Image (cartoon, rainbow, N blue to C red):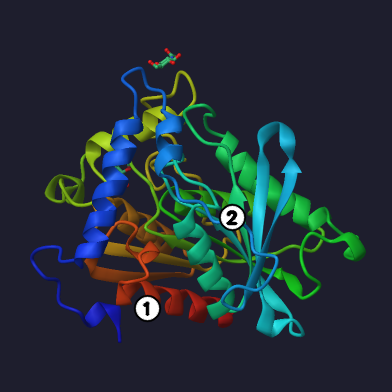
Amino acid sequence: MDATTIKPSPTLSLPWKTRILLTIITTVSDAAVRKNGTINRRLLNFLDFRAPATPKSAKSVTSHDITLDKTRNLWFRVFIPTKHANEPLPVIMFFHGGGFVFLSPDVLAYDAVCRRFARTVPAIVVSVNYRLAPEHKYPAQHDDCFDVLKFLDDDLDMSKSMLPKNADLSRVFVVGDSAGGNLAHHVAYRACGFDFKRLKVAGVVAIQPFFGGEERTDSETRLEGTPIVSVKRTDWTWKAFLPQGEEFNRDHPIVNVSGPNAMDISKIDFPPTMVVVAGFDALHDWQKRYYEWLKKSGKEAYLFEYPNMCHAFYIFPELPEAGQLIGQVSEFIRKR
Ligand SMILES: *[C@@H]1O[C@H](CO)[C@@H](O)[C@H](O)[C@H]1NC(C)=O
Ligand SMILES: *[C@@H]1O[C@H](CO)[C@@H](O)[C@H](O)[C@H]1NC(C)=O
């Protein structure tokens, strides 16, 4: 089924289960935001469902956690598909969403998504626990994610290697949704200017990436009240994330990625990029601008549209579109 052939329906229609989950997520996240700009992490923990690593195979995938730097709690979870041990596999560097403020690789939903990628692509998936705002401001998140790439590139001792022997570091894909999509783009950009020994970023998958600006786009105004994203929430998140003195600088190149201070990517070898957007995502217009900017800069970019879906739809396995997207990501990766 081709996503672009589906006619948009006038209102967002989701199964009850998904709607209830979305309501819980938004209610708890909103309640955890204190008036003084900090986050009540204890309240979040109370409703956080965590999945432990599974050294024994679960759904044909094993997983384990590796700590790189205790001082900044930098660790990642590795997912290994058990049925492909004898063939070289691409590596997915996965960055979870949550507005740079919430969530982690061991949250049930993201553990399940990574497991699904590992099994379906198939690929070795490395899901990074980066530091969160507002406790840690930009560039902590981007530094953490990029550092994992450097660590893996330096990890030459195969006998004690952090990844299985069949991990092919010449085919690394940076993949993320929402804030993780922002990370995927910027980490790929940094990788373009770095001299790796053997690692190569072969592609970017930006699923509903979190970009923005001061300007209110049509989708932001029109889709007020759709799940998860609202102007009030994104305003708060950018302020929590941007460093002191720049809290209100929405023309920051990390935020307004294609705006007036955009990095010039026209002359660099930026990897092929897959951009996923949804019709009921208030961030839709920013994401589409991102795609258009990639094209205008002469880059290989592919747009995948889901007219009837909302922000973060693909973490809900009960939606057929979630499976469809995992399939499209698999195809994008297998082709390269
Ligand atoms: C914000 O409020 C919380 C709870 O009321 C308090 O524990 C915390 O110290 C405050 N932080 C700042 C930076 O004011
Ligand atoms: C961000 O970039 C867009 C172009 O994509 C521009 O129209 C807009 O004015 C910029 N700035 C802000 C603060 O939104």
Residue drawn at (44%, 74%) of the image: 326
Is label 2 in a helix, a strand or a loop? helix
Instruction: Name the image quarter holding the C terminus.
Output: bottom right
Q: Is residue 248 visible?
A: yes
Q: Cα distance, mark 1 to mark 2?
A: 25 Å
**Closest to the observer, 251 or 22:** 22
Is label 1 in a helix, a strand or a loop? helix
Q: Mark 1 highlights which residue?
A: 324
Tag 1: Cα neighbours inside 10 Å, few (<14), some, or many (≥20)? some
Left or right of 84 on screen, residue 209: left
**Closest to the observer, 99 or 238:** 99
Residue 108 position, x and y percent, is: 48, 57
Counting the numbered discs, the total is 2
Left or right of 202 on screen, residue 50: left
Q: Mark 2 highlights which residue?
A: 188
**Closest to the observer, 43 or 175:** 43
